[in-house]
Every structure is written in C-alpha cells, then in structure tokens.
C-alpha cells in the first residue's frame, strides 16, 4: 500500500531534465564519456526514481557527448521506473532478460575503453563485471555530481523545510512519549509511530540515549528504563516526499537537571549558537566546526566533543558538505547541513543539539526551530 498520501513523490519533469543536462555537461568537463547511475540517492536526484538496487542491473546511462540519456533495466523491473520521470522525459529504456549480459549492453554504447563515473552506491556485484566490460576502472560520480547535489534548488529547500517542520512536530510531542518508567525501546516505538504520523515515509533512525547511554553518540536503543534525573538524547529523522530527510536532536532532562549538568549544557548551547551565527557564503566549512569547538574549549570541554560538527543533508542523511576540520570548501547559498555539537561523559551522561540549516545570501535559515535549552520532562 502507498504511504505517500497527498505528497508528491517527485518534482516536475523539467527539474529532472535540467539535472540530466547539467550532469552530462559536468561529466564532459571532467573528461568522462558517461555517468552510470544505479538505484540510490543519485538516481533519485536525477530521475526521481525510488527504485531499489537488486542483483539484476538497472543503470541510467548519461553520455557526455550530447546523446540522450537512457536506462538499461531488467524487463521485470520496468514497472519500478513508473514513479520516475523516465516516461515524461521520453528517455529510451533498454530492457534485458535473464541470460543476457547487461554490462555489455552498457559498454556497447560507449568508446572502448570507456572513461566513466559510477554512482557511489553501485554494489560491487555490478561494478566488477561492469569494469571488465568497459575495459577500465570507473571513478566515483560524487566528484562530478557533488556541486549539483550540494547546492539545493528552491524545490529541494522547500522539501527540507517540510521535513524540518515534520520532525519538529515529533519533538513537540516528547512530553507524552518520553516519560520516567518507560524503556528506551518503548519510547522508540512511539517516536517511530509519531515520525510516520507527522508526514515522513519512514523513520530512518531513532536514537534514544538515556543516562549513561547518552554518552555514546551512536547508541540507538536498549531495554534500559528511563529514570528520574536522567539526561536523554533524542536524535531522530527520516525522509518526507519526494525523499528529502529530516535530522534533529534535542536533549531532555527527566526532572530538574543537576547544576553541573545545566552549566555544561549551557556551554554546549552557546557552542551550537556560535557555529550557526558564523554561517554565511564564503566562510569555510572548517571555520564553522572551529566556532563550536572553540566555545567548548574555552570552558575545558573540547575533549568531550568527539565528532565533526555537521554533515550535508538532502536525499541522503549524510552527504557533502561535511562540517569538519580540514574541509576548506567555502559555504555557498543553497547548501544544507546539520550543526550538531555534542558533549559526552563516559558512563555518566551526554548531550547534543542539532539543527538543519540552509545557507542564505546573508546567513542561514534553520529549518528546526524547537527551543534549544534542556527541556525538562517528568
Ligand atoms: Zn516514496
Ligand atoms: Zn541527527
Ligand atoms: Zn545529523
């Protein structure tokens, strides 16, 4: 059954026509003969297709020489392209049946050896035989598509806003869901239901890190019972149609926090704000990371912030740009990424504050607007 009620599962075909043309041009500039894109976020970006990857090859072929793009697809998967822009764009589909070598079909349309880039998500079971047919090892398409995918257009920004509003509504319900005496797993089940009820097509991740579990940034859930006095990290998100992700963390205190917790949390809140306040076009990604880190360092908390400050987001939950030391890429209008410093005290407690922001001409627009303070629940 479709769970996509109301929301469109893709943009208009003009959006995809533009993306195909720009990616073909980018492939040409990179000196490549073609882009070969199997199901995954890149195929969703280029065609609006939600198709999944299987052992039979489905592959969008985008030549750089101006020839039209086409899709090589197993006959029994043809229907899976129905939700994509393939039909409206009039792209040729080359269907194949079991017993045929689909890799040679792809290679036959290209020079030999062919210089191509493949989707990062292409499975090895396709990449290895494909490379043999092409006569050369492909490179990764991210290098060609990163500029395109990093700068969100207006439709994508609107989709990210909708995703942000949807996950904010889930956090707004935490007073009913996150209650002393319940287990992390019970809380997770209710959050998962709320994520779907508030308009996501899936709960991609639900982290409920209570008490000492909050000190593990990657803790998911357990049967631990939430106790009075716990600090609880809730990091949740998932896609809304047409596939753009939410990702938002808030930290809750079960009862009034210990003064030491409140004091350290206040520094974290200041660190997150310092990073957000610095965002504007032209500033480097690593400067945003440093802005958060320096506030924590000034209070002796730098060693407790054990991960990068953020990651890009869109059709993938984690994509470029990464907000991390060493990334000297400059921010540009239309980029979307998380700002999520955290502090983690092993065996005791942890906290993280995460918003998704979109870079604007003069600063940034957070798509998450729930209060940043330690929200006290009972
Ligand atoms: Zn869908
Ligand atoms: Zn998150
Ligand atoms: Zn995140």
Image (cartoon, rainbow, N blue to C red):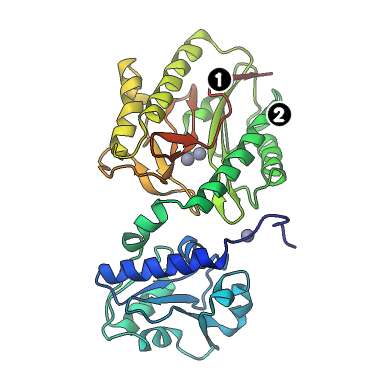
Image location of residue 110, percent across then percent down? 33, 85
Residue found at the far top of this picture: 259
Q: In which quarter of the image is residue 80?
A: bottom right
- Does residue 10 appear to the left or right of 196 in the view shown? left
From the top left corner, tell me how far across and down residue 152 is, in percent: 45, 51
Number of marks: 2
- Seen from the viewer's position, the closer of residues 325 and 124 is 325
Q: What residue sits 33% from the left and 39% below the top?
A: 281
The image quarter containing residue 27 is bottom left
Image point 50% across, 63% down: which residue? Answer: 15
- On the picture, is 315 further left or further right than 202? left
Quadrant where ligand 1 appears? bottom right
Say which element carries label 2. loop
Q: Can residue 61 be seen in this view?
A: yes
Is residue 299 placed above or below 113 in the rendered structure? above
Q: Quadrant of the N terminus?
A: bottom right
Image location (x, y in percent) of residue 79:
64, 77
Q: Is residue 223 something that shows in the picture?
A: no
- Mark 1, residues whose alpha carbon is within 10 Å: few (<14), some, or many (≥20)? many
Q: In which quarter of the image is residue 97?
A: bottom right
Earlier residue among tags 2 and 1: 2
Q: Is residue 31 above or below residue 193?
A: below
Residue corresponding to mark 1 = 374
Q: Where is residue 353 in the image (x, y as percent from the top left)?
A: 49, 29
Drawn side of residue 309 relative to residue 14, left or right? left
Q: Residues within 10 Å of mark 2 (few under 14, many from 20)?
A: some
Q: Residue 182 carries which label?
A: 2
Which quarter of the figure is the C terminus placed in?
top right
């Amino acid at each position: 059954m479709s769970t996509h009620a109301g929301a469109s599962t893709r943009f208009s075909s003009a959006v995809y026509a533009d993306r195909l043309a720009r990616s073909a041009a980018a492939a040409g500039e990179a000196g490549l003969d073609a882009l070969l894109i199997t199901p995954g976020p890149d195929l969703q970006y280029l065609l609006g297709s939600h198709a999944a990857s299987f052992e039979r090859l489905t592959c969008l072929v985008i030549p750089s020489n101006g020839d039209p793009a086409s899709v090589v697809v197993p006959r029994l998967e043809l229907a899976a392209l129905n939700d994509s822009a393939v039909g409206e764009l009039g792209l040729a589909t080359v269907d194949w049946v079991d017993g045929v070598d689909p890799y040679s079909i792809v290679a036959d349309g290209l020079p030999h050896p062919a210089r191509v880039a493949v989707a990062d998500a292409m499975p090895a079971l396709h990449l290895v035989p494909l490379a043999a047919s092409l006569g050369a090892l492909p490179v990764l398409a991210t290098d060609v598509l990163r500029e395109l995918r990093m700068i969100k257009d207006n439709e994508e920004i609107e989709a990210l806003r909708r995703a942000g509003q949807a996950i904010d509504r889930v956090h707004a319900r935490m007073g009913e869901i996150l209650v002393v005496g319940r287990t992390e797993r019970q809380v997770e089940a209710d959050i998962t239901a709320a994520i779907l009820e508030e308009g996501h097509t899936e709960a991609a991740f639900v982290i409920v890190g209570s008490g000492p579990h909050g000190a593990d940034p990657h803790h998911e859930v357990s049967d631990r019972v939430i106790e009075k006095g716990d600090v609880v990290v809730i990091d949740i998100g998932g896609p809304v149609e047409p596939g753009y992700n939410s990702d938002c963390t808030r930290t809750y205190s079960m009862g009034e926090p210990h003064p030491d917790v409140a004091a350290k949390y206040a520094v974290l809140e200041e660190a997150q704000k310092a990073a957000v306040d610095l965002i504007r076009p032209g500033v480097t990604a690593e400067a945003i990371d440093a802005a958060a880190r320096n506030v924590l360092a000034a209070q002796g908390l730098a060693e407790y912030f054990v991960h990068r400050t953020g990651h890009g987001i869109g059709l993938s939950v984690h994509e470029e740009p990464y907000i991390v030391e060493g990334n000297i890429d400059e921010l540009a209008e239309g980029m979307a990424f998380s700002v999520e410093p955290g502090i983690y005290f092993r065996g005791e407690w942890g906290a993280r504050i995460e918003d998704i922001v979109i870079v604007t001409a003069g600063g940034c627009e957070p798509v998450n607007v729930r209060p940043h303070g330690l929200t006290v629940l009972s």
